[in-house]
Image: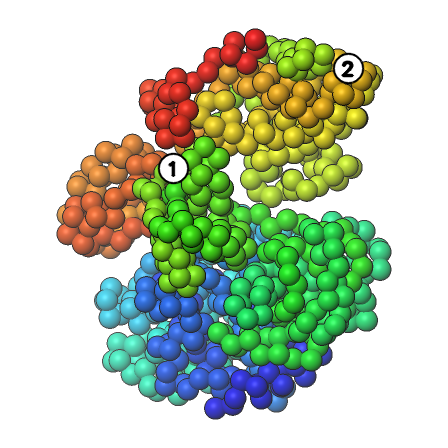
Amino acid sequence: MATKESVAAHVSKLMRNPKNIRNMGIVAHVDHGKTTLSDTLVARAGLISQALAGEQRVLDYDEQEQARGITIKAANISIAFNQGGQDYLINLIDTPGHVDFGGHVTRAMRAVDGIILVVDCVEGVMPQTETVLRQAMKEKVKPVLFINKIDRLMNELKLDFDGMQQRFIKIINGVNKLVEDYAPPEHKEDWKMKVDSGNVAFGSAYNKWAISYPIMKSKGITFKDIYDKCVSGDHASLQATAPLGDVILEMVITKLPNPLEAQKYRIPVIWHGDLNSSAGKAMMNCDPNGKACFMVTAIQVDPHAGDVAVGRLYSGVIKKGTELYLAAQYAREKIQGVAVYMGIDRVTIDEVPAGNIVALVGLKEVYAGETVSEEEIEPFEKIKHHSEPVVTKSIEAKNPRDLMRLVEALRRIAKEDPTVRVTLNQETGEHLLSGMGELHLEIIEYKIRNERKVEIETGPPIVVYHETVVSESPEIEGKSPNKHNRFKVIIKPLEESVLKAFREGEIDEKAKGKDLTERLLKAGLARDEAKNVMRVCDENLLIDMTKGVQYLQEIKESLLEGFEEAVTAGPLAKERVVGVKVILTDATIHVDPAHRGPAQIIPAIRRPIFAGMLLGGAVLLEPKQNLFVTAPADYMSAIIAQIQSRRGQISEVNQEGESLVIKAKVPVSEMFGFANEIRGASQGRAIWYYEYAGYERLPAGLQPTTISSIRKRKGEPETPPSARDFME
């Protein structure tokens, strides 16, 4: 086997030939075989032995990944191959399949140009299969398909030859329906999966073999041969005839685009600057002679090297000493080193040209999603995560002396994983840690205790609610404490189409000026409102509809701060506000700056926003999950009773073989302890999976008690305030 250093040297040479580079990810539902497939490709490159491929799980190098048998974070590896007498470089990202770690998949999609979508042929197209494919299509990332574990069709389901083929057709049609629904219009046809076009492979990653149409033709293999050998258990001859690594590699090289091809159609999607500028042309052409433009997609925290920024270089060349501009920090920093990842190892190289996925060492304050470039440019499109934190735990250091170490640990974890939200409860001094689910928070707690060596105590899980309004308020006047400044506002619910555009990432909160106006207009906001948006904050808008108000510009910053304070912690339960338009209709501002400081302006705008929300019918929204349960038919009634007892709404019950698949929508607040209950109800024979389903209005009967309990937990009076409390 080659050493990682010698491979890195070879990789460094191949980086200069973008025609033979493939930047790709492996994506799938949990347990469909992504990491096993990754192992085979790593073995094909000579970095691990073929015998250990599939068992070593070289890209699941995290201790918790090994212990739990799941991928928790995206892992990068750059590997060189020789195929058909030519050398190729594949920059590979192995991504998680569990819904709690979907943020890693979203960020990986920004760095790659193509994906291998892995589907377990017994389970078929699952919810997370749809989620990851939708994320890829949104970034214009081209898919190919690997239908895995086909030996299970014969050994477990006892399907005959026709049954096997029907299962293949069902999976391919299922994937093609998703391509039809989510692919960019110009790629809906050519990105569809067609066996005879060679973008579909079938096989068994565990048994290290696969076939595709080109391989079947060249080797003279038929589906009947595959069926017969699977039934007889003769995987050795299949592996000898059609090794998994060779088949997948052939498909990747012939069917996925190189950076020269991909950046021409991907850059206009992920970067909204002037495509005719020097930076735009350099990125579109993947030009190593242009100025460096780099997008950070992940942060790895190294105890010795500090923050390591992993991402995609779209133009230029970066080497040690290159000075780069960090868009979010408005600062310049020098690179201390460039490296490629070999799984757990980071190997230093001299320089990296455009079109590659690499790691930059030495950037001090850098975050996932940041734009890093030699010259100041329009930032890349914000990476929009499909789901958001829905479960919170309070967390504090057991020993007060460890408080600063805990704060530092939380800061680093939030950097590594932008889907984690850390806030400080000002009243209690507790840190509140919000994540995608119980498992997500469990992993973070483990990291703090075992990797950061901080003993902590955590509270029970708490659900994250949102506040919104259901109708328009009358015009409300707010006065500053000194009564010298007055603001009139109307509160309205944000249009559903605009809210949808926010959630699908079509409106970036960082967008400004004409770009923001055009996006809001496209989403369905009225023209006069779209032109006068002062601030976008957490899916809420502050709109200035005043005419000729003096001194408004002078107090603008305080006005915006008051608006942001109001939507960060709403009037009902101090939860985040979403989907609200605050329309400023008139204002009277004192002529003397001494009478219009922040202490006067902030409450003068915050209080009428709260009053308007309460008069506009403020309500709580609760997070929901789509739940999918597969179990033998005998346990159906017990499982349905479990779901319904948790306020679950069952939408479908389908028969698949001897099993039933139940689809339902359930509130997150009712799902704590579900795992133990469902195991009991099904005698351990149920398989379940959930995914984020957005926020919906909490039933009216539960609003008062839920609001009271949240307020009590936060140290507030249990009875929420009335509009009059904010109008006096």
Question: Which mark, residue 590?
Answer: 2
Q: Is residue 140 left or right of residue 37?
A: right
Q: Distance between the residues labelled 1 and 2?
A: 43 Å
Question: Which corner quadrant holds the C terminus?
Answer: top right
Q: Quadrant of residue 224?
A: bottom left
Residues at circles 1 and 2 in contact by the CB criterion of under 8 Å: no
- Name the residue type under label 1: Val
| Residue at 41% from the left image edge and 64% from the top image edge | 451
Question: Which mark, residue 584?
Answer: none
Give SS at disc 1.
Answer: strand
**Which residue is tagged 1?**
463
Q: Residue furthest right?
A: 277
- Name the residue type under label 2: His
Q: Is residue 21 left or right of residue 226?
A: right
Q: Within 10 angstroms of label 1, few (less than 14), some, or many (20 or more) residues?
A: many
| Residue at 63% from the left image edge and 27% from the top image edge | 563
| Residue at 60% from the left image edge and 37% from the top image edge | 501
Give the image location of residue 472, x and y in percent.
57, 15
Q: In which quarter of the image is residue 251?
A: bottom right
Q: Nearest the camera: 389 or 728?
A: 728
Q: Within 10 angstroms of label 2, few (less than 14), some, or many (20 or more) residues?
A: some
| Marks 1, 2: nearer the viewer | 2
Give SS at disc 2.
Answer: loop
Q: Residue furthest front?
A: 401
| Residue at 76% from the left image edge and 66% from the top image edge | 323
